[in-house]
Image (cartoon, helix red, strand yellow):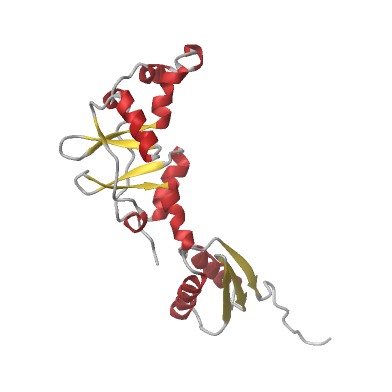
């Protein structure tokens, strides 16, 4: 299972147009309990995003000495066009959940608009959506790992157990490099929280019997 954005995204999205007022956006954020609103044009294409942080700049205006020029500009904004961050950071439906997670983590954002090849909005993905991959049943995770081992490595040499998403892998790989390769593959299986390495590695420097002098 290689989950993509389309597998976990939300398709019912609350959007605003460029002319939406501050009050309208504040009400939408509160009513729908979301942290950001995609801003779309007349064709439904994403042109920006207004987040809670963008709107909170207005509160910060009470002490303008502690905010930068961009925040000061946004603090005076009255519409979505004034407040939005643009161009918007977006993902495609076929992108991996790992790619979306990296974007959110690195950019410190909570939601990403999902767009098609033409830039049209088709959904939104949040941090909570990304965590949905960890709802995968242990038995399903174990079955995929065992299938992976059968397909790429020698079956019967490894024992796999999974509990609450934590995988324990035991067995005797022919080389340390092979063991590490298998562990790397297992870590990338969807739903795996952690991997416990209980492999028995061969000696790095095997003892070679020599002639008795």
Please indicate, yes or no, whether residue 27 appears anywhere in the rendered image.
Answer: yes
Question: x and y percent of residue 133 in the render?
Answer: 44, 59
Question: x and y percent of residue 123 in the render?
Answer: 29, 48
Q: Is residue 71 above or below residue 161?
A: above
Q: Quadrant of the C terminus?
A: bottom right
Q: Residue at 29%, 22% (x, y): give it.
A: 82
**Residue at the left extreme of this rendering:** 43
Question: x and y percent of residue 112 in the render?
Answer: 36, 43
Question: x and y percent of residue 163 in the render?
Answer: 58, 69
Residue closer to the observer: 155 or 180: 155
Q: Quadrant of residue 36?
A: top left
How many labels sit on residues?
A: 0
Q: Quadrant of residue 193?
A: bottom right
Q: Is residue 164 above or below residue 79?
A: below
Please indicate, yes or no, whether residue 85 appears anywhere in the rendered image.
Answer: no
**Residue at the bottom extreme of this rendering:** 212
> In the figure, is residue 16 to the left or right of 71?
left
Q: Is residue 127 above or below residue 50?
A: below
Residue closer to the observer: 113 or 175: 113
Q: Quadrant of the N terminus?
A: bottom left
Q: Residue at 48%, 68% (x, y): give it.
A: 137
Q: Residue at 49%, 73% (x, y): give it.
A: 145
> In the figure, is residue 47 to the left or right of 105?
left
Q: Quadrant of residue 74?
A: top left
């Amino acid at each position: 299972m290689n989950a993509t954005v389309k597998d976990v995204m939300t398709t019912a999205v609350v959007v605003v147009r460029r002319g939406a007022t501050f009050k309208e956006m504040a009400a939408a954020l509160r009513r729908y309990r979301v942290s950001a609103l995609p801003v779309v044009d007349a064709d439904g294409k994403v042109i920006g995003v207004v987040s809670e942080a963008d709107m909170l700049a207005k509160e910060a205006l009470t002490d303008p000495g502690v905010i930068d020029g961009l925040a000061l500009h946004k603090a005076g904004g009255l519409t979505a066009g004034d407040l939005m961050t643009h161009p918007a950071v977006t993902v495609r439906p076929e992108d991996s959940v790992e790619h979306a997670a990296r974007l959110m983590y690195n950019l410190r954002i909570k939601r990403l608009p999902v767009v098609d090849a033409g830039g049209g909005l088709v959904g939104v993905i949040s941090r909570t959506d990304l965590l949905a991959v960890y709802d995968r049943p242990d038995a399903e995770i174990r079955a995929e790992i065992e299938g992976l081992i059968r397909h790429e490595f020698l079956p019967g040499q490894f024992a796999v157990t999974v509990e609450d998403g934590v995988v324990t892998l035991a067995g005797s790989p022919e080389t340390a490099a092979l063991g590490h390769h298998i562990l790397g593959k297992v870590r990338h299986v969807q739903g795996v929280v952690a991997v416990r390495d209980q492999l028995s590695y061969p000696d790095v420097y095997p003892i070679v019997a020599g002639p008795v002098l």
